Image (tube, helix red, strand yellow):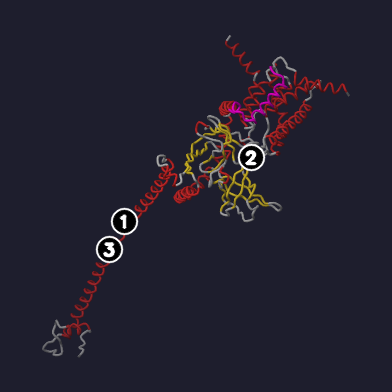
Amino acid sequence: MASLSSKNSFSKFYSWLPIFILFISVLNEFDFNYLGLDYFSFNFPFILIFFFSLKEFKHFDYLLVFIAGLINDTVVGLPLGISSLSYCLICAATSYLRNITIRPHLIKDWFYFLLIISLINSLNYSVLNLFFSYNLNLINYLINNFFTFLFYLFFVNIFNLYLKGLND
Amino acid sequence: MASSRDDFIIAIRSAFLKKSTQQKFSLLTLVFLSIFIILLSSLNFKVIKYLKIGINEIVYRSSFLVSLPENFLKDTFIGISDYTTFFNDYKKNKVELNKLKSNNVSSEIIEFENKELKELINDYISSSNKILAKIIVDHDSPFLKSIIINKGSKDSIKIGTNIYDQSYLVGRVIEVNYKTARVLLLSDLNSNVPVTISPENIQAIITGTGGNHGQIKYMKDGFSDNLTNQSIIYTSGTGAIFKSGIPIGKLKVKENELTKRFEVEFYSDFSQLKYVFAEIIVKTSIESSSEKDANIETPTPFNSKLKILEDELKIVEDTKLKFKEENENLKKEINILNSEILNSKKELSSQKKTIDQFNIDKDELKFLKLNLKYGHKCRKSFFNSKGFLVDSPEYKNCVLTKGRIING
């Protein structure tokens, strides 16, 4: 009986894992910055949100994504609401892609992801620069965009394994 | 054509408005809510400000806890890379420490003089107190270079408070919560610091690059060719944002065929900060002499001045004491040396005496030897009427000249 209950709680935790990881990633910003590698950074929350929103994952609540955005803004020091807006726009874009796609294809999704993150990063850069007078390095944004795009395929495979494990 | 446009609109509308069973809010609501929050946070309402402070407090603490495993990894990584250069660093540090020790005394005196001169220029005395703060969040983001410290308005931290790593400037506070504060590092693109470049004495403004170094953005009289590598850069205090005279880094001139760049190599390594010092400044205005006369009952500024004088006296007394001590030591040394000289003199004279005695003994011995041999030739006797009396000097002369009798 006890083992059944522990198995149950584990499966519950497992099904909420993406949201849990999203919150950890925005609180911790794990991006290997401490390695001190020049010209290397990527946006893990973008990949995670795009993937699970595209898959219409049942525990991926938009409200929680919105809250994760608020937390990210607080941690990074951006004006409150910027990341929430970005995350919500990713969700909207994936929702649109879902609506117009009959047969999903990984490569198409991948390039659509590039388009969306480029648009969102441009929007972020413009809002911060024009309305909040932040000095930002455009090169850093481009590099981040590029690596986020590259890492998408890698993380998609991991997330697919996770989904497979969940279905099993 | 119309149909495809309709499809597009339907897809967009569905994306923004359709809620699946799990969703409590539509995306359009959340997008509007985000925009509303962005506007509110830029308007700086008091309620929003307190709400933001509350959120910050919770999020920073949570971020600190969540970052513990990554920080452990980070520390391990840095630790391992530190060990590889450990011995060389130790040797370098030892040399530097000795150099610094010798500079310390003179810098104390300069500091005091500086304080005194500032008092003469300004109409207030600023007394500062540095408090230690722990860095609880440092993500080293490539976009914004900032850190979160565990001291806030509760500890008298204000916006603009200068933050130090030892005595080097690392940044200033840009956001204050009750128990935490955000520090904008000098390496951030948004950081601008008025500085003086020494020994050329050029006023400039340095800005962050988003990397590990800064760059000179503006110079008062245009970019000069006089600037040399390794010139020292410290805050000028212009604009009263930063205190003057705080060391920042060294100048690095990077030249290629077309351009010449002036970079700033910061003294402090911002990626390895764990603890920093926040300087709490308390400004006390100095009363003019007329005000002083009129307002004797409120002696606070007077007391401050008195305190400075007391400090001055203390330093003078300390210096005097040091000199006295040194003097005593020198006197003792002189006494010891004098007694040594005296002893040597005594020894010398006794040796001289011995030598003299030895010479006398030697002459005597020579006379006795010759006396045995030639005494009969010089002694006056029945057979030798030309001889001399035994104890007379003539006799001695005669013996010494081996019996030859020299007449007057």
Query: Magenta residues?
Result: B24-49
Image marks 1 and 2: residues in contact by CB distance under 8 Å: no
Name the amino acid type tagged 2: Asn
Q: Is residue B220 above or below residue B373?
A: above
Distance from disc 1 to disc 2, alpha carbons, whole Å, reads 62 Å
Q: Helix, strand, or loop for circle 3?
A: helix
Labels 3 and 2: the sequence-earlier one: 2
Q: Is residue B95 visible?
A: no
- Pointer 1 residue: B332
Name the amino acid type tagged 3: Leu
Q: Is residue B326 above or below residue A162?
A: below
Q: Is residue B330 above or below residue B371?
A: above
**Residue B282 within the segment the image draws in magenta:** no
Q: Helix, strand, or loop for circle 1?
A: helix
Task: Give the camera-side residue of B239 and B372.
Answer: B239
Distance from disc 3 to disc 1, alpha carbons, whole Å, reads 15 Å
Q: Position of residue B297 (x, y in %)?
A: 40, 40
Distance from disc 3 to disc 2, alpha carbons, whole Å, reads 75 Å
Q: Helix, strand, or loop for circle 2?
A: loop
Labels 1 and 2: the sequence-earlier one: 2
Dot in front, 3 or 2:
2
- Pointer 3 residue: B342
Name the amino acid type tagged 1: Lys
Q: Position of residue B134 (x, y in %)?
A: 52, 34
Task: Give the camera-side residue of B145 and B389.
Answer: B145
**Residue B45 within the segment the image draws in magenta:** yes
Few, some or many C-alpha atoms within 10 Å of disc 2 (few <14, some 14-19, many ≥20)? some
